[in-house]
Each structure stands twice: as C-alpha cells, then as structure tokens.
Amino acid sequence: MAETGEATAGGPPRRDFLNLVTTAFAAVGVGAVAWPFIASMQPARDVLALASTDVELEPIAEGQAVTVMWRGKPVFVRHRTAADIAAAREVPLSQLPDPQPDQARVQRDQWLVLLGICTHLGCVPLGQKPTDAKGDYNGWFCPCHGSHYDTSGRIRKGPAPRNLEVPQYAFTSDTKIRIG
Ligand code: FES
C-alpha cells in the first residue's frame, strides 16, 4: 500500500499532508512549553507597582516638601512659595553652572519634583526637613562635599557638575502626580 507520496484527490501528496500535520502539532507543542516560560518572564505585580509612584499633593502645605521612593531612589517633591519661584526665575542663566530656566524644570510653578541624588557622587542632599540646612540658595545642601542647589534644584556652588535631575512624571489630577 502506497502510504506516502501518494496523491490525494485534488490535493497534495499524503506525505506532504502528514508533514503539515506533524509541523502543526510541533508548533502547538512549542507554544504550550513557551507560554509558562514567557509568563515567568513577566515582571511581578509588586515590581510593576514600583515602576510608578503616585503622590498626593494636597497634604503638602506651601513651603513644605516630602520625599517618596521611586524605583529605589528618593524623589523630592517641594511645594514652592512665591518667593522660591521668584528667586529661581530672577537669576540670569549666565550665572548658572548648568544653565537651565526654571520654567523648563517644572510643569506647574509651585510644584518642583526632583531626584534627590547629588550629581557629584550620589549623596542625598539635605533640605527636605524644616530643620535641614538648605544651602546658600535656600534649596538643598549636600554636606558630602559642599554642593549648594537653589529653589529650582539647580547647582549653584560646589563640586556637583549638574542640576538635580527632574524625573519623568505627570499630573493625573490637580492634586496628584504619578512619577514614572
Ligand atoms: S556627593 Fe554631593 S557634593 Fe559630593
């Protein structure tokens, strides 16, 4: 009995048909094995949750600041006063070691959001608590080697080469931001 290579009526030879069926089953088999493997590569829920951090702004009074953790790093959120904003805007860019206008660093004037990591060697600057030293420019002071940041988080004095970084964030309502 010619089992293989035999032409079926109006179709491909049976051997080709068997090859097709075998290939299809093999594909399903790979799919079945691959799924648990791919599923195990998905980030865990707690890891996904840490990918972004929501911050309620309402409890932060003018002049106050909070520190939240995002992806293992401190993020400073400061509710700036009118004087903070004016001080950040009146300084000529030519006097800044890392020239950047204040307007380019905020989405809403009174809310400043920064990575709380000194751009010199990575210390966490002081300036979040009311009793902290805030440096010569009323922003943040890094005591490790004496870097002074202003009310826009820009480096003004000391060895840090760059302004405090502004992380990616968005306002999800008038009183809430999502970092990340
Ligand atoms: S790490 Fe901040 S001044 Fe050196």
Image (spheres, rainbow, N blue to C red):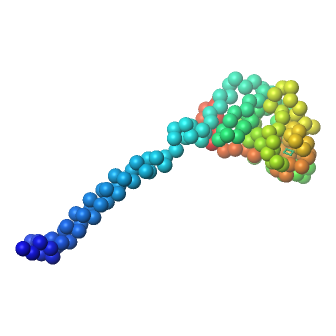
Quarter residue 105 falls in: top right
Q: Is residue 25 left or right of residue 157?
A: left
Query: Closest to the observer: 32 or 102?
Result: 32
Q: Residue furthest left?
A: 1
Asked whether residue 93 appears in the rendered view, the answer is: no
Residue sitting at x 60%, y 38%: 50
Asked whether residue 16 appears in the rendered view, the answer is: yes
Q: In the rendered image, which quarter contains the C terminus?
A: top right
Quarter residue 152 falls in: top right
Query: Closest to the observer: 96 or 13?
Result: 13
Residue 100: x %, y % from top left: 81, 49
Residue 91: x %, y % from top left: 89, 44
Q: Residue furthest front?
A: 1
Q: Is residue 124 left or right of residue 53?
A: right
Residue sitting at x 76%, y 40%: 116
Residue sitting at x 62%, y 36%: 53
Residue 41: x %, y % from top left: 49, 49
Q: Indicate the quadrant of ligand 1 in the picture.
A: top right
Above-or-below relation of 119 to 132: below
Residue sitting at x 79%, y 45%: 122
